[in-house]
Image (tube, rainbow, N blue to C red):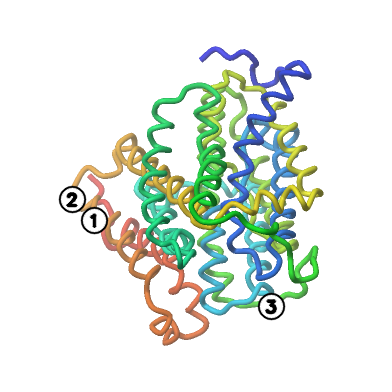
Amino acid sequence: MKFRYNLNDRPSFGAMFLYGLQWLMICIPVVLTSTFVAPEGQTLFFTQKLFALMGATMIINALWGHRLPLVAGPAAVLLMGVLAASQQGSCSEAIYPSIALGGVIVATLAATGLMRRVQSIFTPRIVVAIVVLIAFTMAKPIVGMIFSDKEHQMLAMLFALVAVIAMAMANNLLRGVWKSMVVIVAMIVGSLFYYCMTEFPEQFVSDSVAPQLFISGVKFDAGVVIAFIFCYIALFINQIGSVQSLGEFVGADGMERRQSRGMIVQGAMNIMAGALGVIGPVDYSLSPGVVASSQCASRYTIIPAAAMMIILAFIPDAVALLLTIPQPVMGVVLLYLMCTQVAAGLHLTHSTSATTTFKDGLVLAIPIMFTIVLSFAPQSAMATIPSLLRPIVGNGFVMGIIIILLLEHLFLKEKKQ
């Protein structure tokens, strides 16, 4: 594909600003859809830290890491890990040090060259399963967000149905830069519609607890650590896929070195995320579509967007305004994003021939169904599980990965011809 600006080109100031604004409109909803796991009374400062961390990650990666125009956002798989651990009674002092430890592992694998050996474990079926499991594990928090307004649940249900279909139609019909603006436009229009049907908020979101830059303490919990190690398996695959897909699309050279340096950056920034008490970053795979629609592959255009995110982090009133988006609207946007996640998994199944027999389908179906069952299992059932195992067994996504690994490499292993 021929681009207006190639990977290492530097557009004019005006072009840089406009392309950066386009990237910013994509980065904002990526951050906002992760704020529902913020500690009680700390949503505003939690969001500010997320904006600053994601902006810093993109700048470092564009200039030194993989040197590609990739959007970094809170990793959905870590989001699920935090949510599951919190529901099982784990505290922030146990959760976020586990995120930092995961960052250490990722950076070490990349820096020592062990990344190539670990990659061989992940067959196409395992990769497909992980992509799909993320979406199914998010189903429970999405349901909670959509129906969070007890007085308008019927409105929320109808809004979800219409909005998701409308976003899918817009994604199919729109071209160019507008295609990449579907989510942010849906947030704005959806918020206005929802508040017109209910009532507008009287005040912005504000913290009721004193802001705290770093976590207050460290508590070691073996179950939480093990659960997050499995979450980082998924983050590892996601990161490799995002860099590889965009690198091939823009014709970047030295992909092995780009992968390694990008993984080191992500590991380091996940360590920082753990220290700050927020969700660690990962590169999002939506970037090739944005590059194709704008015909601009310059890595430098991501820097203005990242800089604006960091500036935004230091303007609490602006962040508070963004946080007035209703929970049902945020839940619907997450629902749409998870629909695209499942679609990506199904497309990957076809393109990699991951399922060609009934047995192949069963290898995928079993972990998916277990993930759904465990995600919606009652807390009374989870309370009977020993505390050491609860963060692992109580996390549907982690159990799904464990099951697919066992089925693929042990119980239903392919027979060598």
Residue 222 spot, x, y in % from top left: 58, 76
In the image, residue 156 above or below residue 165: below
Give the number of the disc on residue 219: 3
User: Can residue 401 be seen here?
Assistant: no
| Amino acid type of the residue tagged 2 in the rendering | Phe
Residue 208 spot, x, y in % from top left: 74, 70
| Amino acid type of the residue tagged 3 in the rendering | Lys
Which residue is tagged 2? 358
Marks 1 and 3 in Cβ contact (< 8 Å): no
Separation (CA) of disc 1 from disc 3: 39 Å
* Left/right of residue 81 with respect to residue 20 in the rendered view: left
Marks 2 and 1 in Cβ contact (< 8 Å): yes
Element assignment for label 3: loop
Out of 242 and 51, give the one closest to the viewer. Answer: 51
The residue at 33%/42% (across/down) is 346
The mark nearer the N terminus, 1 or 3, is 3
In the image, residue 255 above or below residue 364: above
Which residue is tagged 1? 362
